[in-house]
Amino acid sequence: MKKITLKVKGMHCQSCATLIEDALEDLGVKGKVDSKKETAVIVFDEKKVSEEKIKKTIIKEGYNVE
């Protein structure tokens, strides 16, 4: 399992964070998203999903990833 922390821009409230967490869950990824800190701490199996796929999923939801 790999753990990464991403900077996520464009979140305005906890609903934004929940939207991202739900999208990550659909990938089989565990994420703790904090809208106030603009971070996403994500734990995932590199054999099942790539970091790039995770970033693309967040971007697809309408947020910027740094």
Image: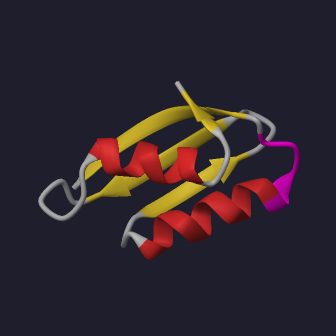
Q: Is residue 17 above or below residue 21?
A: above
In the rendered structure, the answer to whether residue 22 lies left or right of residue 14 reads left
Who's the residue at 38% across and 39% down the image?
4
Residue 38 position within the rendered picture, expressed as x and y whole percent measured from the top left: 70, 34
Residue 16 position within the rendered picture, expressed as x and y whole percent measured from the top left: 77, 55
Who's the residue at 78% across and 42% down the image?
11
Q: Which segment did they paint magenta?
A: 11-15
Q: Nearer the viewer, residue 23 or 3?
A: 23
In the rendered structure, the answer to whether residue 3 lies left or right of residue 65 reads left
Q: Name, please, the residue furthest toward the top.
A: 66
Q: Is residue 43 above or below residue 10?
A: below
Who's the residue at 58% across and 55% down the image?
32
Q: Residue 27 is drawn in which quadrant?
A: bottom left
In the rendered structure, the answer to whether residue 38 lies left or right of residue 44 reads right
Q: Nearer the viewer, residue 3 or 57?
A: 57
In the rendered structure, the answer to whether residue 22 lies left or right of residue 50 reads right
**Count of numbered circles in the view:** 0
Q: Is residue 14 magenta?
A: yes
Q: Quadrant of the N terminus?
A: bottom left
Who's the residue at 81% across and 38% down the image?
36
Most frequent secondary structure within the magenta stretch = loop
Q: Name, please, the residue furthest toward the right.
A: 13
Residue 43 position within the rendered picture, expressed as x and y whole percent measured from the top left: 37, 55
Residue 35 position within the rendered picture, expressed as x and y whole percent measured from the top left: 77, 44
Q: Is residue 50 above or below residue 6?
A: below
